[in-house]
Amino acid sequence: MRLRVALALAVSALVVRALQPQNIASQHAGPLPGGGYLLNTGWTIRPAGDQVPLDTFPMRSAISSDGKYLLALNGGLNPPSISVVDVAAKKELGRTPLPDAWLGLAAAPSGNVFYVGGGSTGKVFELSLAENGTLTRGRDFTVSGSNAPGAPFVGDVALSPDGRVLYAADLYGDGIAQINLQSGKVVDHWKTGRRPYRIVVSPNGAQLLITSWPEAAVYEHESGTGVLIRKLRVGLHPTDMLWIDKPFTAESTGAAYAGRLFVAASNTNTVFAFGVTQDGQLTGLDPVNVSMTPMHPLGMTPSALASDARGRQLYVACSDANVVAVADISAQHPLVLGFIPTASYPTAVRSGNDGQLIVLNGDAPGAENSTRVGSAEFVPQPDPAHLEQWTRTSSEASAYRDDLIYGPITDQAAAFFAQTKEHASPVQHIIYVVKGSASYDAVLGDVPNANGERSRVRFGDAITPNLHALARQFVTYDNFYSNSSSIAEGQNWAAAAIVPDYTARLWASASAGRNKIRNFEGGEPANTPPAGYLWSNALQAGLTVRNYGEWVTNIPAPQAPGQKQVQSVRDGSLTAVTDLNYRGPDTSYKDVDRTAEFLREWKSFDANGQAPQLSIVRLANGAVQSGAADNDRAVGLLVDAVSHSRVWPSTAIFVVEACSEKGVDHVSDYRSPVWVISPYTRRAAVDSSLFNQASVLRTVELILGMRPFTQFDAAAKPMFGSFSESANAQPFTAKFQP
């Protein structure tokens, strides 16, 4: 009966979602007339709670012993800080700046003393909270005195039950530091799983549990010695953990447990559960599936956990779905009761003393052309009536529904161009170009004019004649959005239809110059996306693939003629299909030279009639910088050569920009150009439908007969509205700047 009720609620919400107008061609990302906010990802946010603005990317909260104050760790692009929020007044009282702070925030068991993971400083900071809400910085505990790359990066922190010992996670050192708080000294340091994310100390203080971000595992250690007790297998990218110290009995077996451990696996749609016996043994229990529909793809990103005071309801912050899932965990089989809509990318959740939920959101979209800040969201205690309405709102806000990938293709254009077992697409070759960024309103820096004088010049025909000519000759998309304004996130959106949680939580620290480790493009074990990359999925589908410049490491110095440009490939699936003569990101190397290498191979492929089904081309130089003309000419030469080749009649070229240049467009921070170039695209057309990077990936997937990776490309509207069933094979001739 309980299952039928929950399914009925979910189906009711889906029916409401299905009845909503699906054509949002006239809309732009931003505030909606009826309230809410349309994100550049295609999702809508209509938060259930009251918003208290904080600083950039708040990611962990703590509560004062009297429940009056909420502390929030801000670890984003702006200088890190700890915000103090008056819970009753729902007002930020102040911020305490710190040299760095990342993830770790723990309250001492008595008093109002807090400890903060100091990120790139290699330290833990001690803070004291006064009765009036004033936060004062106290001692610093040094885990490492070095700020060099590879030095300890302190993340999560946790205290022993008696408050005498502090444990700190050394993210890149794959270790745990043990600090004696009386002496202020590190007394021990031991190895644990790779990229330790979250630390939980058992209620009796005997066990230490650590999630290993890339290993799909929880490491259990003796808290005093660090000796490894066992390694628990869970889902991919385990992040937050929650120990509920309340008795629980499994109905089917009658097994009695002293408590339970829940583990969020952010690269799945699942929270894993374990029963804890009196002697500390852990036994797997039924997991919690937080998918919003029966066939929901990966992409919910469960990343933070909390429970009510009785330990009967579990709250799961699902970052990429912009919701908190509410699950009944009082019986053996957990049951998701509904969803609470939040602002964008919830990062933390807790249950307050009065039963209300306090959610931290990484982004609370508001005014355009400004640095995004996060929020603390105060949600009334969930009751059945509220939860039913909130679930309906959450479903309406989601761009995904199951029939988008499991239902028949009803659109005539999509049916004509989609590759299926019964139908071959007329487009057999895709060239997917990821290039440097620009915007419709981009202003180039000082550029010399014909008289040699330097002046500010806008992105236009004089600087980028090929890009403008391609848009005019083929299709102009004037309502297209990049999914991110940062290159680290944007490259992952372009390659995987999602940003791995590792990049989402660390790119800002690197971009701000605090974290010296920039490993967001392959090779970092904790940065794998939930369902692979475009190239890995294409290879698994049996397609022929060639890679030019994605996820590669260049040789360190300029090379003599004939030498390789690339010394390694950071994703194993790319090793056999990468052109090692094609140089990866390097602003001192011209994009026209990259294009020359691509065309050298293309001419050979074309002559043999063996052009790859998918070619991925990285043009790394930024179009808003001095390389604009070089970048433009590179694209022009590529399209010119391909459109004059034998394979052109069955080819489509998609040119996207990895990210937007935030703050330079009058419509949206995220609006950016895109080019779709093919004999099958309508000539001299303008398409004002709302598209984003996931739309490009969805279009490519349908043409090549691939399944979507995540909820984002599965939900994205394909771009076939500007395709024509009648081919026009007229080639493009590159234009050259005077």
Image: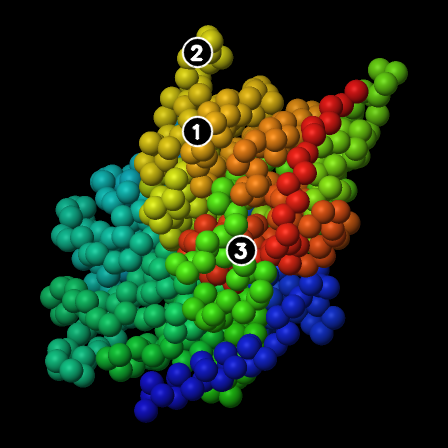
The spot of residue 197 in percent (x, y) is 34, 49
- Residue 46 or residue 143, whichever sits in front: 46
- Residue 706 or residue 631, whichever sits in front: 706
* Residue at 57 percent of width and 66 percent of height: 411
* Residue 441 seen in this snapshot: yes
Separation of residues labelled 1 and 3 (CA atoms) = 25 Å
Mark before the other along the chain sequence, 1 or 2: 2
Question: Which of the 4 image quarters holds residue 545?
Answer: top left
Count residues near mark 2 (Cα–Cα under 10 Å), then give few for <14, some for 14-19, many for 20+. few
* Residue at 34 percent of width and 70 percent of height: 289
Separation of residues labelled 2 and 3 (CA atoms) = 41 Å
Mark before the other along the chain sequence, 2 or 3: 3
* Residue at 14 percent of width and 52 percent of height: 229
The spot of residue 330 in percent (x, y) is 29, 81
Question: Which of the 4 image quarters holds residue 180?
Answer: top left
The spot of residue 119 in percent (x, y) is 44, 41
Which residue is labeled 3 in the image? 417
Q: Amino acid at mark 2?
A: Gly
Which residue is labeled 1 in the image? 608
Q: Amino acid at mark 1?
A: Asn
Circle 1 — which element? helix
- Mark number displayed over residue 562: 2
Count residues near mark 1 (Cα–Cα under 10 Å), then give few for <14, some for 14-19, many for 20+. few
> Where 110 sits versus 557, above or below?
below
Mark before the other along the chain sequence, 1 or 3: 3
* Residue 346 seen in this snapshot: no
- Mark number displayed over residue 7: none
> Where 292 sits versus 28, above or below?
below
